[in-house]
Amino acid sequence: MENQNNNRRSFIRKVTLGGLMAVSIPEILSAAMVPAAMKKNTLIKNNVILFQGDSITDAGRNKEDNSFNNARTLGSGYPLFAGAALLEKYAALNLKVYNKGISGNKVFQLAERWDKDCLDIKPDILSILIGVNDIWHKLEGNYNGTVDIYRKDFIALLERTKKALPNVKLIICEPFAVPGVKAVDSKWYPEFYDYQKAAKDIATQFGATFIPYQKIYDEAQKQAPGAYWTPDGVHPTLAGAQLMAAAWLNAVK
């Protein structure tokens, strides 16, 4: 908390002195990743794109509406910003963008609803961000999972997906957290690093594009304090959601 307060005071001091340069998402992404070297998934006409995950993906979407390309069903987070950019840039491709993230989900809960919320949609590009609840709920005493369970369940989910949709293109997003911002304290570490490593290993195993969100958030804090990007260390602010969307867009072309 002391470190968080110091960062915030430093940020305010820079603003007061007029010395703060504009926060630049392209600069953050350039420092955190090599967009040109990232495996890109080629979009073609009539592609279906599906965002899956927990509350970070859910972002308050209307779960009673199953439509696509709809602000109410895409929520208020990175799928909305990424989806809007895709639909504007690739208007001639007639893309369909869905969001089926559900707050609180862990990997096994994705599996429980996978037929309806993934396989039946038949995505051409499937993006998954999952893992923060697999450790967070454990720390809160509401779940007894382990990183081995996370890895095993995630691999089984993707094997099932590839069997049903052999041509699907996968994007695996790294679970992330911002230490020192409210919910994220020392109890998360070093265990959370193992979840992140598992996600990266799984992306490699399945030939998926991997988005290094932790590195991106780490780099973002050099331009503004953690609380600017996330109010609780996990869920993004509007700036954080835009940062995530900009990174995600580097995964397609």
Image (spheres, grey):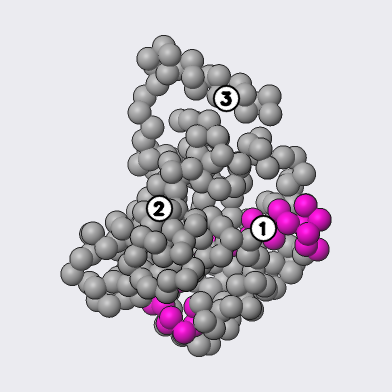
Q: Nearer the viewer, residue 203 or 9?
A: 9
Quadrant of the snapshot with the N terminus: top right
Question: Does dot 1 land on a helix, a strand or a loop?
Answer: helix
- The correct choice, above or below, for 214 with respect to 226 in the image is below
Dividing the picture into quadrants, the one containing residue 239 is top left
Question: In front of the other: label 3 or label 1?
Answer: 1
Q: Which residue is mark 1?
A: 133
Outermost residue on the bottom side: it is: 164
Q: Amino acid at mark 2?
A: Ala
Outermost residue on the left side: it is: 92
Q: What segment is highlighted magenta in the picture?
A: 118-144
Q: Is mark 3 in CB contact (under 8 Å) with mark 1?
A: no
The number of callouts visible is 3
Q: Is mark 2 in CB contact (under 8 Å) with mark 1?
A: no
Q: Earlier in the sequence, mark 3 or mark 1?
A: 3
Classify residue 96 as left or right of residue 176: left
Q: Amino acid at mark 3?
A: Asn
Residue 77 appears at what percent x and percent y?
Answer: 44, 53
Question: Does dot 3 land on a helix, a strand or a loop?
Answer: helix
Q: Is residue 121 magenta?
A: yes
Q: Crowding near pointer 2: few (<14 within 10 Å), some, many (20+)?
A: many
Mark drawn on residue 245: 2
Question: Does dot 2 land on a helix, a strand or a loop?
Answer: helix
How far is mark 3 from mark 1, CA to CA?
26 Å
